[in-house]
Image: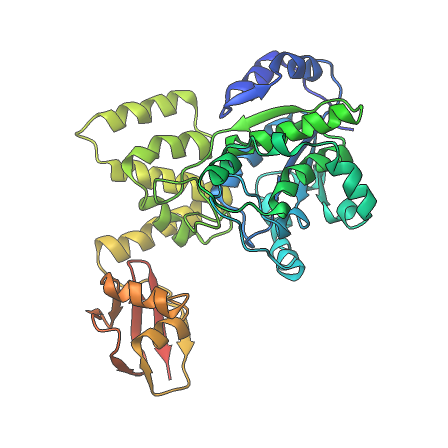
Amino acid sequence: MNKIITDREKIKTLFSHNVEEVIIQDNLEKKLLSGKQLRIKLGCDPSRPDLHLGHSVVIRKLKEFQDLGHQVVFIIGDSTGMIGDPSGKSKTRPALSAEKVKENAKSYFEQVGKILDIKKTEIRYNSEWFSKLRFEDVLTLTGKFTVARILERDDFSKRLKNGIDIGVNEIMYPIMQAYDSIMIEADVEIGGTDQKFNMLAGRGLQKKMDKSQQNVITCPLLVGLNGKEKMSKSLDNYIGITESPNSMFGKIMSISDDMIFYYFKLLTDISKEELDAIEKDLRDISNNPRDLKVKLSKNIIAIYHNKTEADKAEEEFNKIFRDKNKPTNVPEIKLAKKEYNLLDLLTETKLASSKSDARRLVQQGGVKINDVVQKDFETEIEIKDGMIVQVGKRRFVKIKK
């Protein structure tokens, strides 16, 4: 077992750094000072194949516990992922197949290992226990919850008020997350503020099953690239922690100026003194926020890649946006036909996810072929060797015949 660190200053930082609420802080502090190794839980559903920087806020908090010698338990929700967490959702999520969930989960080990010491991390799939439950077991488990209590959830109550359906499977989600805490004997559960209800459900279930109640830590939610909703895979406003340095750099440079400070605060390891200096620089109208975005981008890329890659990403970004040049390495794709409708060309080259997406991109003036803006989505494009198709400012494809 790892040596448990009980330094009061480090514990104080644990409670204050990027934390919204600790339930119950006095109780957890006593546990941390006792020298006993605690089991710290975080669960993630593989609804997409990649974890993002929003996840990193809570995973980095797990790392703080791990550095103090405690046992981190990372749960890959391959069973809960087939429902999808309804937290903050205004409608029922489409169900994912077991095959899709399994496929998405494959890369999670590598991704978690970019932040946690994977050799000291206990990684579990919650299908371990859910696949073994009989129907009578499910009835016994659900009997420990009331419908009224579940429907107290803010998102559920809003949907009821607005006459929007709530699936019975969605009601099961917080019950399943609570049962995860029973099965891995969690002492502490960490999650975003939107997870508070689910995590408290774990405390309630532990109490009813005569188990020691887990403490709960909520962390701030990271706002996504659109500057509105939380960073989310389902909203496609995220930066994956395994994205390429060039992609990371471009996305971070696109955030609004009022998000710079919070991204530094939630996503980097800079000191309080540096953070105070950044806040001061942002208030000084003589400073260009772009310079701070560059610093932020390189700082984050250095965490998930390295400093050399961060420098290269800056050079590539300047080449494209400042010097108006093409990227150094443009992906090439070979096409079978000699002519394509513009919408078909965009979907065939994967620059658009669908024809409707392609139509929207054209209408927004975001599509160029050999630097010429395409305005007519019904036009037929003659395919020529070396043709450059561009969507937006960062996505390019070179056509090979």
Outermost residue, left side: 286
Question: Which residue is at a point 66% across and 42% down the rendered structure image?
Answer: 172
Quadrant the N terminus occupies: top right
Q: Is residue 121 left or right of residue 135?
A: left
Of residues 60 and 164, the one drawn nearer to the viewer in this rendering: 164
Residue 365 horizontal/vertical position (percent): 22, 63
Of residues 376 and 309, the one drawn nearer to the viewer in this rendering: 376
Compared with residue 6, is residue 323 higher up or lower down, i.e. above or below? Answer: below
Q: Is residue 64 left or right of residue 347?
A: right
Residue 344 horizontal/vertical position (percent): 36, 76
Outermost residue, bottom side: 338
Question: Which residue is at a point 60% across and 17% down the rendered structure image?
Answer: 11
Residue 308 horizontal/vertical position (percent): 43, 47
* Numbered-mark total: 0
Compared with residue 364, is residue 80 higher up or lower down, i.e. above or below? Answer: above
Colour theme: rainbow
Q: Residue 351 is drawn in which quadrant?
A: bottom left
Quadrant the C terminus occupies: bottom left
Q: Can the viewer see residue 21 in this picture? A: yes
Question: Which residue is at a point 37% across and 51% down the rendered structure image?
Answer: 313
Q: Can the viewer see residue 189 in this picture? A: no
Q: Is residue 130 left or right of residue 97?
A: right
Residue 332 horizontal/vertical position (percent): 40, 73
Q: Is residue 254 left or right of residue 22?
A: left
